[in-house]
Image: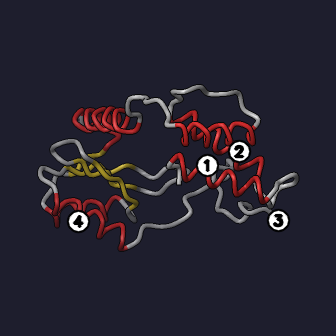
Amino acid sequence: MGWFSKRKRTDGGAVVSDRDATRADLAALREFVESRRGVEAFVEPATSVTQTTVLLVASDGEWTRKRIASPKVASDFARKQGIPLYDANRVGYPQRMRDYNQRSSAKRATTSSPQRASLSPDRFKALMVLESIAGAEPLGKEPAPEEIERVWKRARNAAHPDRRGGDRTQWDKVEEAARTLGLH
């Protein structure tokens, strides 16, 4: 029997949510409301995969989504917190949420891929070790971080001692190269 065979499924075969709403979900929603300004709640109906959820959106567009037991619980929560509650199917989501997502995505893109810099001799040597173990084409002197990580993953797969053809000495070389390149 497979790992996922005991998951709840709909008549159409879709996997149903693997857990129900908990008190921790309500506590997280409460904390979000208390720590941000201008929060509005949007109730999202249950689907064949997830149960009812509440999306909270702050005035700056920051948002969080949590499971909730029912639309009535969502209504009671919003009333107790003194925040407006909207039906997401009727009013949609606020533009400030989409703007926040775009700002966050742009910020991640600029911080996660700094300007390429030439590799030091030690780092270049470590990269060459990874390339040779992975059987990859040489990346050159100024590879992108994503390219280095891709080669590292291929090298780990090729050298893993628990895999057929894996070798502990090769694995140790991969790990040492990863430390030199700051991948750990």
Q: Whole-Å distance between the Cαs marked 3 and 2?
A: 32 Å
In the rendered structure, which amino acid carries the disc numbered 1?
Ala
Q: Whole-Å distance between the Cαs marked 4 and 1?
A: 43 Å
Q: Whole-Å distance between the Cαs marked 3 and 1?
A: 40 Å
Circle 4 is placed at which residue position?
31
Circle 3 is placed at which residue position?
1
Residue closer to the observer: 71 or 136: 136
- Left or right: residue 88 versus residue 48 is left
Few, some or many residues within 10 Å of mark 1 (<14, 14–19, 20+): many
Mark sitting on residue 177: 1
Q: Residue at x 58, y 41 (%)?
A: 149
Mark sitting on residue 155: 2
Q: Are marks 1 and 2 in contact (CB under 8 Å)?
A: yes
Few, some or many residues within 10 Å of mark 2 (<14, 14–19, 20+): many
- Left or right: residue 33 versus residue 72 is left
Kind of element beneath mark 1: helix
